[in-house]
Amino acid sequence: MAQPHKASLYTRTLFTGIILGVVAMLAMVFSNQFMQSFGLGALDGTNPAAMMVAQLYMFTAMAAIPFSAALISAALVMRHLDNRLAAMVHPEGRRAQAEGNGG
């Protein structure tokens, strides 16, 4: 019963990291359209609220990229450790599966 929970945890972590990375990349690609839709095409420093919105938008997009990479890496480490621990607990079962005996 605990095994499906572990599998779903690293699967959810992996998909969350991938989705976050895709959203961040799309936010960076469409940043020019976002800025122009709010009238932030020419930031000259006279409107502090517009400057804050622009900086917050770009910071969010830039901060999401490393966080996405961290989630994907964590999912891969969780999966690797799960397989290693399962092999340590049941070494004969893993050996039989590797040989193709079904075990």
Image (cartoon, rainbow, N blue to C red):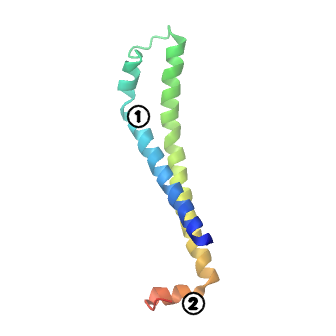
Q: Residue 62, image x and y in percent? A: 49, 36
Q: Residue at x 52, y 45 (%)?
A: 66
Residue that numbered label 2 is attached to: 92
Secondary structure found at label 1: helix
Say left or right for 27 vs 74: left
Amino acid found under the numbered disc labelled 2: Glu
Q: Nearer the viewer, mark 2 or mark 1?
A: 2
Secondary structure found at label 2: helix
Say left or right for 76 vs 28: right
In the image, farthest residue toward the bottom? 101
Is 14 placed above or below 92 here? Answer: above
In the image, farthest residue toward the top? 46
Q: Residue 40, image x and y in percent? A: 42, 16
Quadrant of the frame with the N terminus: bottom right
Residue that numbered label 1 is attached to: 28
Q: Residue at x 49, y 50 (%)?
A: 17
Which of the two discs, 2 and 1, labels the residue nearer the N terminus? 1
For the residues marked 2 and 1, what is the alpha-carbon distance in whole angstroms? Answer: 50 Å
Q: Which mark is residue 6?
A: none
Among the 4 quarters of the image, the one containing residue 86: bottom right
Among the 4 quarters of the image, the one containing residue 34: top left
Among the 4 quarters of the image, the one containing residue 3: bottom right
Q: How many marks?
A: 2
Q: Residues within 10 Å of mark 2 (few under 14, many from 20)?
A: few
Q: Residues within 10 Å of mark 1 (few under 14, many from 20)?
A: some
Is 95 placed above or below 17 here? Answer: below
Q: Residue 25, image x and y in percent? A: 41, 40
